[in-house]
Image (cartoon, rainbow, N blue to C red):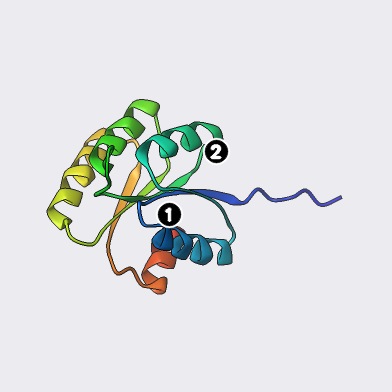
Amino acid sequence: MVEDIPRRRLLVVDDEPAFCRFVQDVAQDIDFSVEMTTTGREFMTTYTLFLPKTIVMDIVMPEIEGVELTQWLIQEGFTGKLILVTDYAPNYVAVAQRLADASAQFKTITLLKPVGIDDLEAALNET
């Protein structure tokens, strides 16, 4: 009997649903199981239920933004891979990147929107 190999779990948080769907489509093609959220609060709830190993996070969002969510992930003990994305705040991404790097708990990758399929696949597959 062949056991099912568990798929890699990816959680996406971006206030732009079209970008979430783009990430989902690309990730599912390379064997990820994907959950999508559009708010920070929804992200926190889904994270605790889904326990992703990879996260794609927009930095600038209403209510709870990416820097706060990065701090929250550090407190939660996240040890996977965090892919930070932004389209107009590369300096703001640097703050989240420094927080994550200082924690040394998880790997971070930064992508600038518009994100290409090849760049996204490379970031998702990077170990």
Q: Which mark is residue 50?
A: 2
Q: Nearer the viewer, residue 84 or 88?
A: 88
Q: Nearer the viewer, residue 93 or 127?
A: 93
**Could you tell me the amino acid type at mark 1?**
Thr
> Which residue appears farthest toward the top when viewing the image?
75
Quadrant location, the C terminus? bottom left
Residue 96 in picture, x, y percent from top left: 22, 43
Q: Residue at x 26, y 49 (%)?
A: 59
> Which residue appears farthest toward the left when viewing the image?
91
Residue 39 in picture, x, y percent from top left: 37, 42
Q: Say if residue 69 shows up in the picture.
A: yes
**Could you tell me the amino acid type at mark 2?**
Phe
Q: Which mark is residue 73?
A: none
Residue 9 in picture, x, y percent from top left: 54, 48
Secondary structure of residue under mark 2: helix
The total of numbered circles placed on residues is 2
On the picture, is 83 further left or further right than 100? right
Q: Say if residue 79 shows up in the picture.
A: no
On the picture, is 26 further left or further right than 87? right
Q: Which mark is residue 127?
A: 1
Q: Nearer the viewer, residue 38 or 71?
A: 38
Q: Residue at x 42, y 34 (%)?
A: 44
Measured Cα–Cα span from mark 1 to mark 2:
20 Å
Q: Residue at x 29, y 38 (%)?
A: 70
Identify the mark nearer the N-term, 1 or 2.
Answer: 2
